[in-house]
Every structure is written in structure tokens, then in C-alpha cells.
Amino acid sequence: GQNIDQPTEMTATEGAIVQINCTYQTSGFNGLFWYQQHAGEAPTFLSYNVLDGLEEKGRFSSFLSRSKGYSYLLLKELQMKDSASYLCAAMDSNYQLIWGAGTKLIIKP
Amino acid sequence: GAVVSQHPSWVICKSGTSVKIECRSLDFQATTMFWYRQFPKQSLMLMATSNEGSKATYEQGVEKDKFLINHASLTLSTLTVTSAHPEDSSFYICSANTAEPYEQYFGPGTRLTVT
């Protein structure tokens, strides 16, 4: 079956770095997405990886290893506004997104 | 970036009535739109895939006669919750693919409360 695993909750300190891991199993693979979702709002797109390696976008970076079925989202210089849920989603061979349950990130001062 | 709008942003209705939610891609044409439902503290659940000019494809367990989806044009898809019940109260979110199929953008969501 198709499955996405990511931690339920993580806590980090303002100004620090945090890495949110995601492992996936899908029927075919057409890329790995990360979304940020604040409480009561729709998700917003953060990153897309389809090739192995690290993609950097400002304070956020995303990494993919297709052979390991593994991705992570790296957040640097954490700010209080980064407190949110981070959703990992893998696109299968039918171009359908398979969603993880999300990781709730709590930032402490 | 691509913009997807939803209307209304929130709605309260009485049990037994129907509610229509619109999803529009504002600056691009979307041949495929998706409808999700999200209950509090849970992840997104795909309800159906909406293709312009054809019938929607519903996920297992989603009643197609209760959740009517119409994708009338390349920029508009509608979800109608018929004979709504309190258990239908949820956050409904649509998304649309840009021409490059790997980018999916979400609307702001519609919070439905059925009393």
C-alpha cells in the first residue's frame, strides 16, 4: 500500500534549526512536496523535489533520497511564526498526492 | 505564483439544506481540481478529483450523490453538499494544478458549520 510517515510533533527553540523527516512508499513516484499549514488555514506550498539532493529556498531547505524513500525539511533561524503543521506529500504514478498526517512544530522563545 | 480562490470562506447552514462552494483558479487554467476535507487536528482527506468537462472521480467512502462536483470550465469547480448534516461540518479545501502538473495550489478553504 501507499504510506507516508512523519513525526506527529516536534519542539524547537527560536533561532535554532530543526529537521522534519518524512519517509514514503508509493506506487510510482513523481515528486515529494512539503506544505506549511497554520491552524485554521489552508496549506501553502513550500517545496517540491523530484531529483535526489538538496533544494534551498531562503531559510527553508528540502532534501530527497529516492532510493531510500526519504525526505526532510530543514528550517533554519526559526521564528515564532514558523509554528505550524508541516505536511509531507508524495505524488504517485497517477499524479495523485499521498499525504502524511503532518508534523506539528512548536517554537519556544 | 498561481492563485486559487474559494467562496464562501465560511458558511453556517441548517441541517437538511444544501450548500455550494466555489473554487476558482484566478490566473491560470486548471484542467484538474481536487476537493479535500479536513477535520480538526487531522490531515487532508482527498474527496474527489474534478476534471473539466467530465464526471468527477470520487475517493472510496465519499458519497457522490451527497457531494456533487461540477467542473464547468477550466477556471471553476463547484462542490455542493446536499442535505447537509452536522457531521458534514468541516473545513473544505480545493486545489488546482498549474499547466506543469507538479505544482498544486490550494484555495484558502471554506469552513462549513451545519446546525
Image (tube, coloured by chain):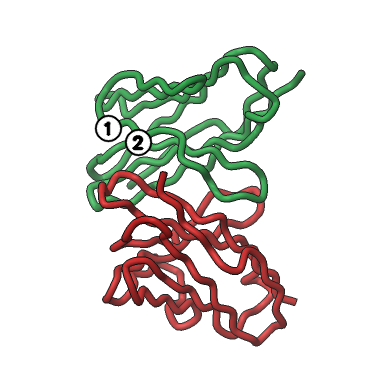
Chain colours: A green, B red
Q: Tell me if label 2 and label 1 are in contact, CB under 8 Å.
A: yes
Local SS, label 2? strand
The residue depicted at 63 percent of the width and 29 percent of the height is A82
Residue A56 drawn above or below residue B10: above
User: Tag 1: Cα neighbours inside 10 Å, few (<14), some, or many (≥20)?
Assistant: some
Q: Residue at x 65, y 78 (%)?
A: B85
Residue at the extreme top = A16
Which of the two labelled residues, at mark 2 and mark 1, occupies the earlier sequence position?
2
- Dot 2 amino acid type: Leu
Above or below for A46 versus B33:
above
Residue A56, quarter of the rendered image: top left
User: Identity of the amino acid at label 1?
Assistant: Val
Q: Quadrant of residue B15?
A: bottom right
The residue to which callout 1 is attached is A50
Spot occupied by residue A31 in the image (x, y as percentages of width and height)? 30, 37
Left or right: residue B107 versus residue A94 is right
- Look at 32% across and 31% down and name the residue there: A49
Give left or right: position of A81 versus B48: right
Asked if residue A27 is positioned above or below residue B11 in the image, the reply reads: above
Q: Secondary structure at mark 1?
A: loop
To which residue does mark 2 refer?
A32
Q: Position of residue A107 (x, y in %)?
A: 69, 24
Q: Residue shown at 27%/32% (left/top)?
A: A50
Corner quadrant of residue B72: bottom left
> x%, y% of residue B45?
49, 56
